[in-house]
Image: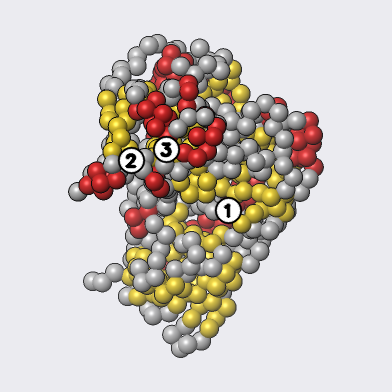
Amino acid sequence: MIKNISNLGDSAVYCDFGTEVNETVNSNVINYFNHLTDFIKKGKIIGINNLTPSYNKLIVSFDLSLTNFIKLKKIIENLNIYNNIEKKNQKIEIPVCCDGEYGLDFDRLNQKLNLSKKEILKLYFNKEYFCYMTGFIAGMPFLGNVNEKIRCNRLETPRVKVPEGSVGITEQFANIYTFESPGGWNIIGNTPRKIFNKSNLQDPALIKPGDKVTFFQISKEEYFKFNE
Amino acid sequence: MSKTYFEILRPGINTTIQDTGRNHLYHIGITISGAMDQRNYKFANNIVNNKLNEGAIEFAYQGPLLKLRNGNINFGITGDIFFNIIRNNSQIEEGKCYQNYNLHDGEQIDIISSKKSVYGYLSVSGGFELKETWKSYSVNTKAQIGPNNGKKYCINEKIFIKKSKIENVKNNQIDYKDSFNNIVRVIKGTNFDYFSNQAQNIFFKEKYTVSQLVDRMGMRLDGPNLDNIVNTNIKSEGLVRGVIQIPADGKPIILLSDHGTIGGYPKIGIVISADLDKVAQLAPGNKLEFKEVKLEEAEKLFKEYTVETNKYLNEYN
């Protein structure tokens, strides 16, 4: 199921599951992630620091003083993978305000897509999204697939600061900035809902791989009232 | 009995608690954090006889001015740092890095600035009173995780110190000086072939300059643009410390301790583990050059780095 395994620097294994991005490929990635997580918990593998599943890749970073690329590559190649994903898919609804200062990139999108703000939003909201992965910053979900008519590259020069709660799109994906952060996505709005809660130590990230997400538009007034 | 603590009279520019970092959370987007210069962090703990993974104060450029309250402690500072100890008789003693000092109730440590490098470390014997979050003391200011509610220290805040007997701490000194060499060794990245032959040559031949846009997350470089001939975006995927990304503007970004866990810019290279401390210590305006090494050589260089680090550590343990 892994198409190719290579090294990412001297302290990470780069597992490539192919160029396609779809739910089947992503489920393979998550399956390997679950198996390796289980092995680490049971103490069957030493030296792994982190596992990062994404659309079609799994990055295994490790402590070079405890193991190395060749050893881990062998272990991963010889993993006995069986289908055991238990998916407790949640359905999550996210309110978004797209007014004025929240929709930072409509000028750019109007130009690139040749669509009005209204048309873009109609296509954006009329859709159920699938969570492929969580990351970049704590709890940020990567959701697909955005309607083909509103797909656009990321910014040529990333912003130094994207505001917390920003909802962005890039190519076939949508995401939510859980914290103020640098970033290059096209920002169409902002949500008042808390997507990452650090005081929930067991389960700090609201949206996890496999979850279904829908967005609905709210006014500025509703935005400010949301957390009251 | 009242607790011993530092009162922060001046916080400095970016003063936080750090340790070896926070692992096993990349998959929900929580990055490793940890001391930017792991070697100097370990040395700081070593000179005050701490466990090497005890939480230490990390500061950058201008450090804090700290007044000790309710007790006596033993402390040490590492890095390339200019600092003074203000004694109770108002005498100012110029501090030396890589050795430990006793500090008495009411005395102050004034960490004025780093000299050529950026980060320095302050450890106290016995350690600070800290709570772990996901098995680490490291502050992650972006996700607001770790001691001090995941924030930089501010004026008038307190940093509590565990009780310790300073009579038991012997004098320690490490005879170490950072060697500043501007060659950064890298392994080719997974998207190296996204760049034109010319860009590939430029990357390993030309000098780059550290721009003003540098923090614990990453370091943007100024220098010749690198021409991408395939695609300036990739499908977002996992990242590690040391990855060198090239966004569409053609200027490299080196990812550091608080880097995002996932990213969509092509990776032209990855800094080898042995050079990560050195890269983190480069200041805006510093020049650097990239040199290619193969995996086997990078592994060998990391062993040498570890042996060298341990050589200093073993001297006084």
- Residue B203: x and y in percent read 74, 40
- Residue B80: x and y in percent read 62, 64
Asked if labels 1 and 3 share a chain, the reply is no
Q: Is residue A193 left or right of residue A74?
A: left
- Residue B172: x and y in percent read 54, 66
Question: Can you identify the residue that label 2 sits on?
Answer: A97
The relative height of residue A30 versus residue B215 in the rendered view (above or below) is above
**Can you see residue B268?**
yes
Distance between mark 1 and mark 2 Cα atoms: 32 Å
The relative height of residue A196 versus residue B142 in the rendered view (above or below) is above
**Amino acid type at image mark 3:** Ile
Question: Can you identify the residue that label 1 sits on?
Answer: B214
- Report the chain holding disc 3: A
Quarter of the image where one finds residue A199: top left
Question: Can you identify the residue that label 3 sits on?
Answer: A188
Residue ID at (37%, 50%) = B144
Residue ID at (55%, 43%) = A158
Distance between mark 3 and mark 2 Cα atoms: 9 Å
The mark closer to the camera, 1 or 2, is: 2
**Can you see residue B174?**
no
At label 3, counting other C-alpha atoms closer than 10 Å, the crowd grade (few under 14, some 14-19, many 20 or more) is many
**Cβ–Cβ below 8 Å for labels 3 and 2?**
no
- Residue B316: x and y in percent read 56, 59
Quarter of the image where one finds residue B74: bottom left
